[in-house]
Image (cartoon, rainbow, N blue to C red):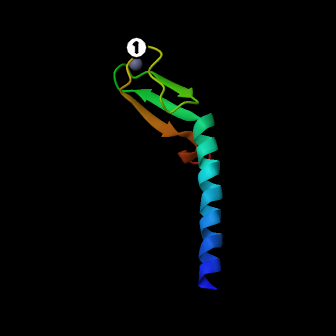
Amino acid sequence: MAEVKSNKHNSIIAQWQEKIKIANRNNIFFHCRNCNHEWVDSSFDAICNNCGNNNVERICCWQFPDG
Ligand SMILES: [Zn+2]
């Protein structure tokens, strides 16, 4: 029965990974290391819309604590 438990656990992890993926897609906070511009985008591959640099820091908004 240990196998059944482990399968269930894996499916819960898969559900979470899907939720995190959706959260990532919708709300990623970006910080440009080149010009310090800050913005929110929905794509992980965003470049700075202020200076065009791709040396940007990505922070997923769901990582921010509430309040
Ligand atoms: Zn920039």
Q: Residue 39: where, in percent of width, then height?
A: 52, 25
Q: Quick one: quadrant of the C terminus?
A: top right
Identify the residue at image location x=64%, y=49%. Answer: 19
- Amino acid identity at mark 1: Cys
Q: Tell me if residue 29 comes above or below residue 8 in the rendering.
A: above
Q: Quadrant of the N terminus?
A: bottom right
For image coordinates 50% across by 33% down, the residue present is 44
The reply, left or right, for residue 25 in relation to residue 31 is right
Query: In the shown orientation, is residue 9 left or right of residue 30?
Result: right
Image quarter for ligand 1: top left
Please provide percent x and percent y for residue 40.
56, 28
User: Up-down: is 15 above or below 22?
Assistant: below
Which one is in front, 35 or 4?
Answer: 4
Q: Quadrant of residue 27?
A: top right
Where residue 29 appears, as percent x and y from the top left, is 52, 33
Q: Residue at 58% of width from left, 30% of height from top?
A: 42
To which residue does mark 1 refer? Answer: 51
Residue 14 vs 61, above or below: the answer is: below
Indicate the quadrant where residue 21 lies: top right
Residue 65 percent location from the top left of the image: 57, 48
- The answer to whether the residue bearing label 1 lies less than 8 angstroms from the nearest atom of ligand 1 is yes
Q: Which of 55 and 6 is in front in this view?
A: 6
